[in-house]
Image (spheres, grey):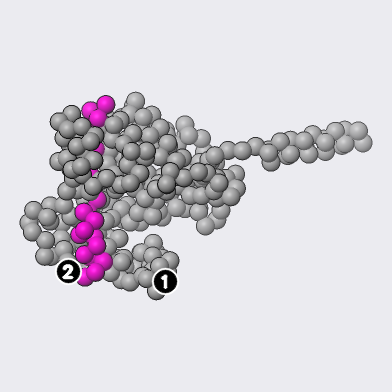
Amino acid sequence: MKKIIVIVVVFIFQTGIFAQNKAPYVIYNAKGKKVSYKKMLKELAKKDIVLFGELHNNPISHWLEYEVTESLNKSRNLILGAEMMEADNQDELNDYLNGKINQKALDTLARLWPNYKTDYKPLIDFAKDNKLQFIATNIPRRFAQEVYKKGFQALDTLTDKEKKWVAPLPFPFDSELPTYKNILKMMGDHGSPKLVMAQASKDATMAHFILQNYIPGNLFIHYNGSYHSDYFEGIMWYLKQSKPNLKYASVTTVSQEDVFSLLEENKGKANFIIVVDENMTTTY
């Protein structure tokens, strides 16, 4: 009887301690099994292309993007790229990476996101310090806005020079992809088929510039909003349309009240799912 009481007391004590533990994030695989940072890193190091899906204002996303990049750079030759830099700013970005212009000049010449200094400058400076390529992969936003207004036909009116900043036309498009259909559901009355086309124009262009700049034997790490690669669609769908034999992996970031158990709705979103405490502060 005493043994039973001791076991119960120990169980209650341990459960109480566990319940009081706090963690800013936990990593899971696609099936919902917890994995270590080391395990994730080991798997990512085997790939050709990694899509790192972030929540744009989440500090854990940005911190882990940097940590993963720094860790993988020790064992692989890296090429970096990001949604947050648009293809027509590649020359200005190259000038900054090569030391031809300073940060003030880059701020003036390139279209940088409002959270650039806190969230993306560390990655670009890492590339600069380590002499890595950093590819501006996204379609110029003004072109995507025109697609939103007029559909894909808006891209046909671009000049030959402007078309170099977009995926080769015409690019494939599947409006029945679940993530594209979900955009219409999420946007309600504000959604339209052309909105989905605008999203696809970004995905196709990012995939194009990833593959255009990928070098066999290297590892290309691409940073993008998680929705652009969740469920292995978006950018990943376009990558596999062109180069199905490359080895791909995706990482996504989600926010939950309880980080110690992956919600069913978040399973299968990526090869690795970073669950961040929903009380986490934001960068903007």
Q: Residues within 10 Å of mark 2 (few under 14, many from 20)?
A: few
**Of the residues shown, which amino acid type is indicated by label 1?**
Gly
**Residue 103 on image: x %, y %:** 24, 34
* Contact flag, marks 1 and 2 (Cβ < 8 Å): no
Identified at 27% across, 63% down, the residue is 198
Identified at 42% across, 71% down, the residue is 188
Horizontally, residue 216 falls left or right of residue 4, namely left
Q: For numbered disc 2, what is the local secondary structure?
A: helix
Identified at 27% across, 41% down, the residue is 81
Residue farthest to the bottom? 189
**Residue 153 on image: x %, y %:** 17, 69
What range of the chain is rendered magenta?
Answer: 128-150
Q: Which image quadrant is residue 186 in?
A: bottom left
Identified at 58% across, 50% down, the residue is 257
Residue 142 forms part of the magenta stretch: yes
In this rendered view, identify the residue nearer to me: 188 or 117: 117
Q: Is residue 252 visible?
A: no
**Of the residues shown, which amino acid type is indicated by label 2?**
Gln
> What residue is shown with label 1?
188
